[in-house]
Amino acid sequence: MSLPRTLGELRHSPYSEETLRTRRVKDELRDNLVTRLRAGCPIFPGIVGYDDTVVPQIVNAVLSRHNFILLGLRGQAKSRILRALTTLLDPQMPYIAGCEIHDHPYAPICRRCREFVAEQGDSTPIAYLSQDERYVEKLATPDVTIADLIGDIDPIKAARGGHELSSEMTVHYGLLPRANRGIFAINELPDLAGKIQVGLFNIMQEGDVQIKGYPIRLPLDLALVFSANPEDYTARGKIITPLKDRIGSEIRTHYPATVEEGIAITAQEAWTQRNKHKLHVPKYVQEVIERIAFAAREDKKVDKRSGVSQRLPISCMENVISNAERRAIRHQEKLVVPRIGDVYAAMPAITGKLELEYEGEMKGADHVGRELIRTAVAKTYDSYFKGAEMNQVVQWFDLGGEIQLADTAGAAEALTSLRNIQGLMEKLVKLNVGPKDTPEAQVSAAEFVLEGLHAHKRIGRNEERVFTAGEKTPKATEKSFEREDLPPFRGRRPYN
Ligand SMILES: [Zn+2]
């Protein structure tokens, strides 16, 4: 279908004056949402874990035609949800061609367009915006000015056009007017200076604003959405009350409630499908990676206020695969199977995403990171091997057995040494791995068992990744291993 190109054509199209004139952005979002709800389609495809919590609240906010704010910690898909709102806009929106603020064909607010329409009548040219073009996003920082957000008086424009300074013809428009008839998102709202918040409020409330003392009338049509850290937002004095009052709905986001949900998000977001190499990421590796984030969110050495982003497991997964890929390339293996050793090698993807408390700072990010991996390995190991008889394996080490499993060691060679450990390979059945599986998969699974035993301090391992007998404190170790309530590790060794 070819779109109407002039105001005259537009009048006799589905975009008639009757349908369009009173339809504001929030009506448009609402109408399209209602259609989607009726059809029973997912509202925000690709947003995982929010179906029963965040999504219904957003739906209600849109149905209520509210401006709303998402309150949540880092990496809770806030920006992603806000961006997904564009899918509720019409595919094409007509506006008066050439207008900087995308004026409404039937109700232009800028003088340029009003004069233009008066002059050209039905031959006024019409242009269109797509959904994405109607989304403007701004990260709030203390140095954002009224000029950035709303606009500035341009004396040159005034002089050239012979306009008065207070005429809107002299305004150099900021982000907000340029987002007119679309969605405007401000991230980290509390970082916006009070003065700017007042300007924002005036636009929302009255449709006019003062720029350098000149009153400028701008009755903009916008859906305003915000995001903020909950503590910053609720802190007294960070948000001016009248602005808070104008935000219709306050919606809390959260981290994945279960490891399974976390795995689903990470699987969706991480870059895993790479060329050339066939990849198999064992379930226990996925779980360990996810549980690092879960453990970090509970760890008192990690700052609770900033949270632990879902980007931690996502970046970690990418690095884990890369380390495994590097090994596969070196040994000309056809299959890439990550191991727990690769998770330890992915430390650069972990440490940068942890805001540490004082105690954590003292111990160092690396130390904290390794502890988190160990906790994650111990928990994952328990989910497969809780109560499993591992004495034979432990005994092999106690009798002086040693094995080195560098993260760079090829699968064939590693498998040969692992087979020497009596009682080990048959335990892998719990991981659905047997002697017929590829060497890559068998080595990864066997190494996971050893890492699990090490995480529970039943066997030792040094920095060169040599597994050895553990340091025994007779009886007591056996007991504490079974007891969940005891802190699993009190590092006696300087390494993990
Ligand atoms: Zn205009």
Image (cartoon, rainbow, N blue to C red):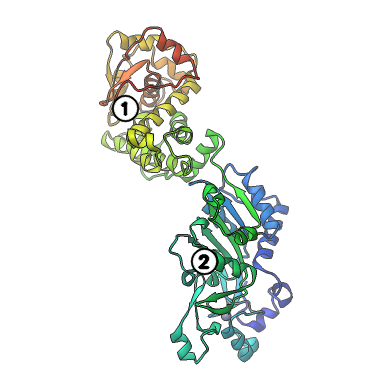
Q: Nearer the viewer, residue 410 or 185?
A: 185
Label 1: few (<14), some (14–19) or many (≥20) C-alpha neighbours in 10 Å: many
Q: Secondary structure at mark 1?
A: helix
Quadrant where the C terminus lies?
Answer: top left
Residue 427 in sight in this render: yes
Q: Position of residue 195 (x, y in %)?
A: 52, 66
Label 2: few (<14), some (14–19) or many (≥20) C-alpha neighbours in 10 Å: few
Q: Position of residue 351 (x, y in %)?
A: 36, 39
- Whether the residue carrying mark 2 lies under 8 Å from ligand 1 is answered with no
Disc 2 from disc 1: Cα separation: 63 Å
Q: Secondary structure at mark 2?
A: helix
Side of 88 where 467 appears, left or right: left
Q: Position of residue 491 (x, y in %)?
A: 35, 23
Q: Which residue is mark 1?
A: 411
Amino acid carrying mark 2 in the image = Lys
Give the mark, 2 or 1, whose residue is nearer the N terminus: 2
Side of 279 where 52 appears, left or right: right
Give the residue displayed 56% in from the left and 43% down from the top. Answer: 254
Amino acid carrying mark 1 in the image = Ala
Q: Which residue is mark 2?
A: 195
Q: Position of residue 257 (x, y in %)?
A: 57, 36
